[in-house]
Image: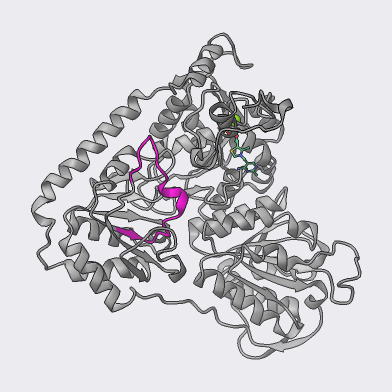
Amino acid sequence: MSKDASRADTRTVVSGATRMTPSEAFVETLVANGVTEMFGIMGSAFMDAMDIFAPAGIRLIPVVHEQGAGHMADGYSRVSGRHGVVIGQNGPGISNCVTSIAAAYWAHSPVVIVTPQTGTNSIGLGGFQEADQLPMFQEFTKYQGHVTNPARMAEFTGRCFDRALSEMGPTQLNIPRDYFYGEITCEIPKPSRLERGAGGENSLNEAAELLAKAKFPVIISGGGVVMADAVEECKALAERLGAPVVNSYLHNDSFPASHPLWCGPLGYQGSKAAMKLISQADVVVALGSRLGPFGTLPQHGMDYWPQNAKIIQIDADNKMLGLVKKISVGICGDAKAAAVALLARLQDRELACDASKAARAQKVADEKAAWEKELDEWTHERDPFSLDMIEEAKGETPFSGGEYLHPRQVLRELEKAMPEDVMVSTDIGNINSISNSYLRFEKPRSFFAAMSYGNCGYAFPTIIGAKCAAPHRPAISYAGDGAWAMSMMETLTCVRENIPVTAVVFHNRQWGAEKKNQVDFYNRRFVAGELENPSFAEIARSMGAEGITVDRLEDVGPALKKAIDMQMNEGKTTILEIMCTRELGDPFRRDALSKPVRLLDKYKDYV
Ligand SMILES: Cc1ncc(C[n+]2csc(CCOP(=O)(O)OP(=O)(O)O)c2C)c(N)n1
Ligand SMILES: [Mg+2]
């Protein structure tokens, strides 16, 4: 028998009611759902099932810390559209995953977390590694399947996989560890995949009427466009309307950057062109977007949300319609099907905006050109603190020699050196946020930012997971030095498991994003913000990866290209450490802070 034939046999699922063990029922259901990789750390709790992962064609990728496994599953699912699967030891192995499952929840990732639990014969007795594992994830899962009887193992497993995709978010499969053992008769459920429609006829008709009368329609292309594989349909709708398309916050891959109607992202450190254009809209189509509150905050001193525009919101989750922004029409539907349905209604109709198509196209081109020019000239930050830090850096030499670089210039050079078909993940931090202006993509499932949960330490494990799902694509993560140190131990996973990626670390010796708040609101009283680190390139080398320290602007692009070459052609992971000044761009949440008030005399100077 050929190798392929034996693999095909392995991946064939037993059919009909069959005598098996619960471990076999669990593993067969994983196979039925197409699982080929899982992330986690081994443990006695699920060893009986783990023992047959390999013959079932499933690779369990061992990580350094279970939080990393959760992020890897998230990245894996975001790039592939398939489930990401995490597993760990009951108790601590599972509680280690809480942050990453929360992050996956807010990234709308179909992650299944398998949580073996204390055995039923000792639940409640305070034994070893005991924890009530359902409340931990309650807030961050779309469904929690608790196996109440070993005979129902396949049923609950299958439902967790179904619900993760139908609700686009993490689900939890909780299994008392003694329930892996025994003998049962069961059938392996066939995966059920929800077919979504375009939305209700009335709401689609109403939306088409608004669009037919619109003079300056603008489309927001959201995460739902990526998830529904709807870029082509979004493009067709935009072209019919001649409408500028802006990306929703952190969904820069939801519309191709080379398209004439693309304007860049809204939100924190987004595109001024996008903001100026949407501020003129009389009708906005939010296609596949929940219009999250953080994504439309004022930026660059502009409160750009068009208060008087009619908003058409399309989301697959009805609970998102009108939740954050006041809307005129809400369509509960699939982004792809809805875009097709709207286009069909507008295709052969005369539209109010037809007459101004050329003029609007010119406006889009002009705004984009102006923003590019501004970015080119924006070589460093110009606020008083940043100017002080730039001055300070002139008198210092990094440990590597060379000089400290301006983050914006570094980001521009990285942008220019990006390989084709790249996947990029970004972390939470000041320089990472600024990178939003410089990350452009041609195809969906290419950009994996830490979404609304906003945890530092997200980007690196996430790109490792993405690389597992798409080994043929170049994979790059961005992180600040603080966030990097939280996650860098997963370099060992890259080396040990042969998963080559490129990690860019912006080494500015501080928890910069939070220090920015101390600059703006606390009179530069810095508390716990400084990070005097050793060389991260050197640490990387000691872990068996490559390490490059960059301290000259002209080296940024070549260093990235070299790292990508080593990733794609030699299977090597490289940590690219870029020495940056301490200058800081605009803060995250100016809206959420206020100047300190002190009532006690002894603190009166702290204002
Ligand atoms: C897990 C976690 N802890 C703390 C924070 C708060 N926080 C947000 S940004 C930031 C600073 C990030 O510093 P760094 O990674 O060095 O990037 P920089 O801002 O310096 O570019 C911190 C501490 C967070 N978002 N997540
Ligand atoms: Mg930093």
Does any portion of residue 405 appear in the rendered image? no
Estimate the x, y position of residue 165 in percent, counting from the top left: 52, 69
Give 492 or 593, whichever is nearer the viewer: 593
Q: Residue at x 53, y 10 (%)?
A: 394
Q: Residue at x 74, y 76 (%)?
A: 23
Estimate the x, y position of residue 453 in percent, counting from the top left: 57, 51
Quarter of the picture for ligand 2? top right
Answer with the quarter of the image where residue 115 lies.
bottom right
Q: Quadrant of the C terminus?
A: top right
Task: State the residue lying farthest toward the top.
Answer: 395
Q: Is residue 374 above or below residue 190?
A: above
Q: Is residue 298 magenta?
A: yes
Total marks in image: 0
Does any portion of residue 456 appear in the rendered image? yes
Estimate the x, y position of residue 297 in percent, counting from the top left: 42, 45
Q: Is residue 54 magenta?
A: no
Q: Is residue 595 above or below residue 337?
A: above
- Is residue 534 found left or right of 377 in the rendered image? right
Q: Quadrant of the N terminus?
A: bottom right
Give 314 or 76, whichever is nearer the viewer: 314
Q: Residue at x 56, y 12 (%)?
A: 392
Q: Residue at x 28, y 46 (%)?
A: 279
- Is residue 439 found left or right of 272 in the rendered image? right
Estimate the x, y position of residue 507 in percent, counting from the top left: 59, 27
Instruction: Identify the main secondary structure in magenta.
Output: loop
Answer with the quarter of the image where residue 549 lies.
top right
Q: How is the image coloured?
A: one colour
The residue segment tinted magenta is 285-304
Q: Is residue 41 above or below residue 423?
A: below
